[in-house]
Amino acid sequence: MAVRPQWASLPGHVRHAIADRLGGPVTDVADQTGGFTPGVAARLRLGVGAPTRHVFVKAVQAGHPLAAAYRHEAAVAARLPAATPAPGLLWAAEVDGWLVLCFAAIAGRHPDLTPRSPDVRLVVDAVAAAGPVLTPSPAREVPTSAEARGRWLHGWQAMAAAGGDLDEARPYGIDVLAQWKPCGSMTPTGKPSCMGTCAPTTC
């Protein structure tokens, strides 16, 4: 997990520029501490009284090594259909040397993914619902999963091929996992096949 800087750590002129772009004063901040990138991530409330609105903002210095990943995220998010079950990108811009992405904020909480939690089915259903909306990919110029990560996502097959003592892992379904095709393989119907994981984090 990354150690995230807080919204208040952004230079004052950057925070003011973001507020101007949002069209109203930032009246409340909920810093988001989870995730894997060392950028600012915060849920902002705008305005006073009623109505108010919320947005989710993430920012990293434009020269940071991970800035390219933020630009990639913005490029892909901007191409997602409106029906995608995910918060929409409102805008992305470079603000006084900081790369800022602003998304619609949604009310919610991190899911409980412990075994037999009712949240697991909700997460699986949400991921499944995204499939038809995002097939074929709306971001045609972006590398496919097979191209970008295919050489990494075959751990179960590699473990099975290497042999060894897998008895401890078998109760957790490793034999089933090893039968999945590597990421990017095509099914008999011509649709891409990929197995991954879901984690309740904010990148």
Image (cartoon, rainbow, N blue to C red):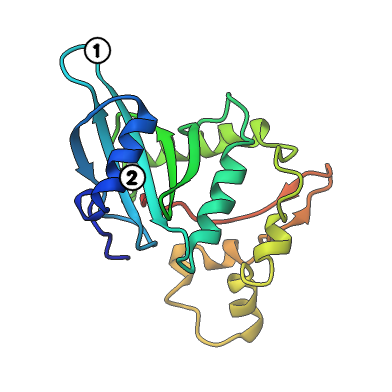
The answer to whether residue 164 is left or right of residue 179 is left
The answer to whether residue 89 is left or right of residue 43 is right
Q: Nearer the viewer, residue 184 or 82?
A: 82
Which residue is located at x 35 percent, y 58 percent?
A: 39
* Kind of residue at badge 2: Arg
Q: Residue lying farthest top?
A: 50
Instruction: Tell me the mark number nearer the camera, choosing from 1 and 2.
Output: 1
Residue 4 appears in which quarter of the rendering? Answer: bottom left
Give whichever of discs 1 and 2 has the lower sequence position: 1
| Image quarter (top left, top right, bottom left or bottom right) of the N terminus | bottom left
Q: Which residue is tagged 2?
A: 116
Q: Nearer the viewer, residue 192 or 84?
A: 84
Counting other residues with Cα less than 10 Å from the Cα at mark 1, is it few (<14), some (14-19), or many (20 or more)? Answer: few
- In the picture shown, does residue 121 fall above or below 113? above
- In the picture shown, does residue 152 fall above or below 142? below
The answer to whether residue 141 is left or right of residue 153 is right
Q: Measured from the top left, where is residue 110 in percent x and y?
A: 30, 43
* Kind of residue at badge 1: Pro
Q: Nearer the viewer, residue 185 or 106?
A: 106
- In the picture shown, does residue 191 fall above or below 26? below
Q: Is residue 166 visible?
A: yes
Q: Which residue is tagged 1?
A: 51
